[in-house]
Amino acid sequence: QVQLVESGGGLVQAGDSLRLSCAASGRTFGAYGMGWFRQAPRKEREFVAGITWSGGSTSYTDSVKGRFTVSRDNAKNTLYLQMNHLNAEDTAVYYCATVRTAYGVLGLRENEYDYWGRGTQVTVSS
């Protein structure tokens, strides 16, 4: 059974940094693309960042480009999201997810992902 467990969220001030982690088990981690999504209060869940199975390609939503960096350590079965220069609009529950297809393309939409973590709360005070 695939399990994804996020950690690293918390309450920070605007301008601060956080690094989220997502520990994966139950699947050959290095064979699947991964992604980070977030859901703010009263909003739909949105794509934040994605990375291919090899880590060779990444993609970001426009609002986080230049501030967030997605990476992975396949030896540790762990996905990361380094978030710098946080602002109040980044406040949300952050979820990691794994793409459905092994050795596939980078996933940008929710329906391309099949397993999800429970999320970690990030709150940025202004």
Image: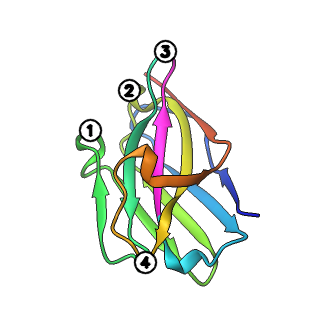
Percent position of residue 18, x then y? 51, 48
Image quadrant for the N terminus?
bottom right
Q: Residue at x 37, y 57 (%)?
A: 107
Q: Is residue 9 left or right of residue 59?
A: right
First reached walking from the N terminus: tag 3 or tag 4: 3
Say which mark, if any, is on residue 42: 3
Percent position of residue 116, x then y? 61, 49
Question: Residue under circle 1?
Answer: 63
Circle count = 4
Whether 50 is drawn above or below 12: the answer is below
Q: Residue at x 39, y 37 (%)?
A: 15
SS at badge 4? loop
First reached walking from the N terminus: tag 2 or tag 1: 1
First reached walking from the N terminus: tag 1 or tag 3: 3
Whether 110 is drawn above or below 3: the answer is above
Q: Amino acid at mark 2?
A: Glu
Say which mark, if any, is on residue 89: 2
Q: Residues within 10 Å of mark 3 (few under 14, many from 20)?
A: few
Whether 62 is drawn above or below 19: the answer is above
Q: Nearer the viewer, mark 2 or mark 3?
A: 3
| Magenta residues (range) | 34-42
First reached walking from the N terminus: tag 4 or tag 1: 1
Which residue is nearer to you in this view: 48 or 1?
Answer: 1
Q: Nearer the viewer, mark 2 or mark 4?
A: 4
Question: Residue under circle 4?
Answer: 103
The residues tagged by marks 1 and 3 sit, at their Cα atoms, a distance apart of 18 Å
SS at badge 3? loop
